[in-house]
């Protein structure tokens, strides 16, 4: 069954902060479903013509500790599948994204020993580090920075606090770094997230926003589990 496209208010795309792509990417033996495009990492070609995608959790009997997801286009067709990798003494967070051919497209990793750091690296296997995602401690709002590989802030994600808005539908705005322009949205509804961004945004930045969506979903999921399992006070 096809998913209905998100019908909320469209983002304002008048001012978009992006990172210019390199002239070309290293050659790779990666084979995907779409033809390779010069200047686009293998596996990200389908993001070129996308301004909206959705991500939903996939429940399986063999899922174990790690969660699994499907990334869908506006027609509800699967573009990617993603799996959390949980290892003893491994990264705090490790998510691998693959295309429908089973080829690695992206990895999102947090290696810090201290969980309060929340510095996520977004890695494209055929290219390397393309961005970072970090959150800032704030009890009143969710404040996430999207950075380029040089750790320069490119975009911000702002929304309700995880302390007060972990149940029900939640919407986060993707804003320019001066917070003056909304350039995208991430909407969490149950086990599905809808992401919107400008069609002409640089493709690796679209990938980093998708990685940010996984991060936000992970935080919401953790808070909901904690709230559901903590002892009730009389």
Image: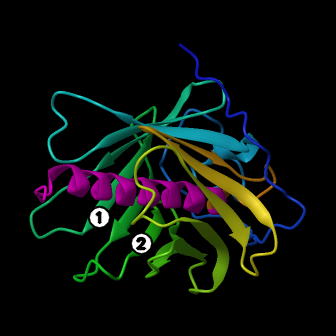
Residue that extends furthest to the top in the rendered view of this protein: 1
Instruction: State how many labels appear.
Output: 2
Residue that extends furthest to the front in the rendered view of this protein: 234
The residue sitting at 81% across, 54% down in the picture is 200
Asked if residue 1 lies in the magenta stretch, the reply is no
Residue that extends furthest to the right in the rendered view of this protein: 14
Secondary structure of the residue carrying tag 2 is strand
Q: Which residue is mark 2?
A: 120
Could you tell me residue 46's position as x and y percent? 65, 40
> Which colour scheme appears in the figure?
rainbow
Mark 1 is surrounded, within 10 Å at the Cα level, by few (under 14), some (14 to 19) or many (20 or more) other residues, namely many
Q: Nearer the viewer, residue 64 or 80?
A: 64
Could you tell me residue 7's position as x and y percent? 72, 33
Label placed on residue 130: none
Q: Quadrant of the C terminus?
A: bottom left
Q: Nearer the viewer, residue 169 or 102?
A: 169
Q: Which residue is mark 1?
A: 93
Mark 2 is surrounded, within 10 Å at the Cα level, by few (under 14), some (14 to 19) or many (20 or more) other residues, namely many
Horizontal side, residue 65 vs residue 25: left or right: left
Could you tell me residue 71's position as x and y percent? 50, 38
Q: Are marks 1 and 2 in contact (CB under 8 Å)?
A: yes
N-term mark: 1 or 2: 1
The residue sitting at 14% across, 60% down in the picture is 87
Secondary structure of the residue carrying tag 1 is strand
Could you tell me residue 149's position as x and y percent? 56, 80
Q: Which residues are magenta?
A: 205-234
Looking at the magenta stretch, what is its main secondary structure? Answer: helix
Q: CA distance from mark 1 to mark 2?
A: 8 Å
Q: Nearer the viewer, residue 13 or 81?
A: 13
Give residue 19's quadrant in the image.
bottom right
Horizontal side, residue 50 vs residue 168: left or right: right
Horizontal side, residue 49 vs residue 71: left or right: right
């Amino acid at each position: 069954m096809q998913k209905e496209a998100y019908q909320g208010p469209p983002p304002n795309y008048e001012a978009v902060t992006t990172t210019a792509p390199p002239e070309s990417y290293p050659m790779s033996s990666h084979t995907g479903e779409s033809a390779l495009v010069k200047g686009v990492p293998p596996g990200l070609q389908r993001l070129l013509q996308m301004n909206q995608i959705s991500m939903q959790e996939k429940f399986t009997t063999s899922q174990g500790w790690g969660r699994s997801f499907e990334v869908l286009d506006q027609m509800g067709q699967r573009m990617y599948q993603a799996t959390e990798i949980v290892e003893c003494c491994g990264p705090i967070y490790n998510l691998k994204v693959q295309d429908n051919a089973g080829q690695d497209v992206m990895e999102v990793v947090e290696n810090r020993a201290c969980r309060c750091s929340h510095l996520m690296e977004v890695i494209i296997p055929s290219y390397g580090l393309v961005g970072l995602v970090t959150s800032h401690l704030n009890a009143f709002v969710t404040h996430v920075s999207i950075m380029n590989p040089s750790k320069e802030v490119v975009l911000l994600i702002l929304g309700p606090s995880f302390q007060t808005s972990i149940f029900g539908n939640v919407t986060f705005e993707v804003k320019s770094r001066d917070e003056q322009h909304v350039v995208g949205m991430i909407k969490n509804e149950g086990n599905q997230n809808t992401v919107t961004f400008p069609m002409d945004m640089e493709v690796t930045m679209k990938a980093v926003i998708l990685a940010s969506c996984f991060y936000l979903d992970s935080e919401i999921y953790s808070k909901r589990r904690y709230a559901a399992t903590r002892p009730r006070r009389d």
